[in-house]
Structure formats: structure tokens, C-alpha cells
Image: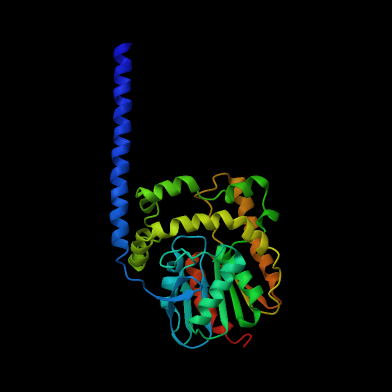
Amino acid sequence: MTRFLKWTKRIGLGLIALVIFLLVIGFIFEKISRNDAEKIAPDGNFVKIENHRLHYYKTGNGGPTVVFETAFDPAGHLQWYNIQQKLPTSFTSISYDRAGILWSERGQNPKSGEQMAKELHLLLEKANLPKPYILVGHSFGGTLVRFFINKYPKDVGGVILTDSQCPDDKRYLSPELYKMVNQGLPSGFLKFANNFGLARLMFKGMFPNSKEYEYQNSIMPALLYKSADVVLEEQDKMNSIKKEASKIKSFGNIPLLVLTVTDKNRYDSFIKDEKLKAEMLNAWSNMQKDFLLLSTDSKQILGQTAAIISIRTSQKLLKIRSMRW
């Protein structure tokens, strides 16, 4: 018995020593990786917003300006990078990194929907981007554009919601499903992982593993250490942002396109219960249809995959430019 306890103790101490060794290696790896990441040149430009700088990526020239708002994601403007390459250069397109994401500085402003709309508007003004603005919001970005439209309606020539988040999704979901889809990321663990090189490994390869996405798959993990804490901060503010956004119920007569993915297998990876999956598909369909009520001039376009939606977005942008201005 005594010998067994001694061996158990030795094994335990050995495992602790191994964990400490791996953490030290991870910490050193993270420091070296961050030092290398600081040498990566930004792919866009900067404007100063009050006490910090925001990074944006621009293509094309001339009006209108298509403004891409990103989802809840550390990838920032990289979400829209490939789509911008495919758009006509006869008008301007811009994507940007919200404060604290990728190359944008965090600043001191609160992470509220109204404040983020104000910062985006200042960015567009200071970058001298031509009006009107056609706002394109995906997922959480679709919630955020509501604040911009509410605050600066005269500057908006059209809105495109691409598989947008519904800010009052609680109305459409059962308590069990609502809790499941709104549980969020494990903040404590990710903050720990971000300091020891684990987070960049976990988020490696978020984009498709193809040559078309090589750039995004190299930049996003490299700069994750800058984005991680702010993404978690946005998550902490998510409920309050959604609550305020749900009060914005009308875009007036601003033209609105609702682009919706109809892939029935889209939830297979995280909803195993067939009944809950069916509920989610039905609820998502109803949420997307109800977005049409936001504007007196609205239309929905359905697609089987995100790729189809993206292509159709590109095609419709040229048409929406003449709908209001």
C-alpha cells in the first residue's frame, strides 16, 4: 500500500511538472508569435476616432459605398475580404475592424450598439467615402446596423441583411433552445488559453481550407491575441445590445434585402436532438421572414449555402444603388 501511494504521488508530481513545462513552452511560443505578428503590415488604412484608430479595407471608387458590418467574430474585416475582391470597382466597398479587433485600437468608448454606430459613421465621414451607404450586416452585424440606420437614416441608401441575427430571438425559441444557442464562449478558459498559445491553435483554420482563403487563415490566428479579449467583451454586452436593437422596429422606406441560407443541415454540428433542430430551422425561417416588416420596401432571397448568398449579394448591390437615391 505504501509503495502504491509513493508511485501515485510520483505520477501526480510528474503530471504536474509536465503541465507546468507545457504551459511555459506555450507562454514562450505565444510571446514569440505576438512579436512576429507585430511585423505584419495592415492590408488597409486607418482613421482616428476620438482617442483611437480604426482600421478599414477599401476597394473600388465612386458612389455608393457598400459598408460591410461583421459578425461576432475575431476575424473582423477578413470575413468580407474575398467578397470585396469580386465586387465591381465602379463603386466603393469597405469593411472594417470594430474597436479592438485585429488592427483597430480598442479606445475607451463603451461597447454599445449606439456607440459602435457612431464610430462607424465617423470612420466613413473621415475616410471621405461617398454616400449613400449600403449597409450589409451578417449575423451580429445585422443587429448592429439597426443602430446606424436609426441614427443616420438620411445617409443610408439600402440595407442587406445576410443571414442576420434576430435581436429578439427569445420570442421565437423555447427556453431550452434559447439557452443552447445563446450560451456563448467560455470566457475564463479562452482568456487563459489566449496567454499560453492555445487560443491561436483552437481558432486555426476557421476559414475554408482552400487557396482562396490562405490569407485569412494566416492573418486571423496571428492577430487573435489582439481580438480575443474584445470579442469576449462584445459577448458580455450582447444581451444589452440585442435588447436595445429589438426596440428599433422600422427602417421606414429604406430598401431592404433579406438574404437567408436555407441549408437544412446547417445545425447538424451543434444540435444533435432532431426535435430541437427542427424547431431551430422553423424559428430561423420565421425570424428571417419577419425582417421584411422592418421596411415598406423589402424583399427576401433564399439560398442553399453561404456561397450562394454571397454571390447573390454581389449581384443585387448594383440594383439596390438606384432604389432610393
Residue nearest the observer in this picture, 299 or 133: 133
Name the quarter where the C terminus is drawn: bottom right
Q: Looking at the image, what colour scheme do you see?
A: rainbow
How many marks can you see? 0
Q: Is residue 273 left or right of residue 92?
A: right
> Outermost residue, top direction?
1
When the figure is inspected, residue 97 is found, relative to residue 94, above or below; the finding is above
Residue 31 in the image, given as x and y percentages of width and height: 31, 53
Residue nearest the observer in this picture, 20 or 138: 20
Q: Is residue 39 left or right of residue 167?
A: left
> Outermost residue, front direction?
51
Residue nearest the observer in this picture, 175 or 49: 49
Residue 215 in the image, given as x and y percentages of width and height: 34, 67
Q: Is residue 73 left or right of residue 214?
A: right
When the figure is inspected, residue 3 is found, relative to residue 48, above or below; the finding is above
Q: Is residue 128 left or right of residue 241?
A: left
Residue at the spot 54% in from the left edge and 65% down from the top edge? 109
Residue at the spot 47% in from the left edge and 77% down from the top edge? 94
Q: For residue 45, what is the image quadrant?
A: bottom left
Q: For residue 162, what is the image quadrant?
A: bottom right
Residue 11 in the image, given as x and y percentages of width and height: 30, 25
Report if residue 286 is visible in the image: no
Report if residue 85 is visible in the image: yes
Residue at the spot 30% in from the left edge and 41% down from the top edge? 22
Residue at the spot 42% in from the left edge and 46% down from the top edge? 192
When the figure is inspected, residue 239 is found, relative to residue 313, above or below; the finding is above
Name the quarter where the N terminus is drawn: top left
Residue 115 in the image, given as x and y percentages of width and height: 59, 68
When the figure is inspected, residue 235 is found, relative to residue 296, above or below; the finding is above
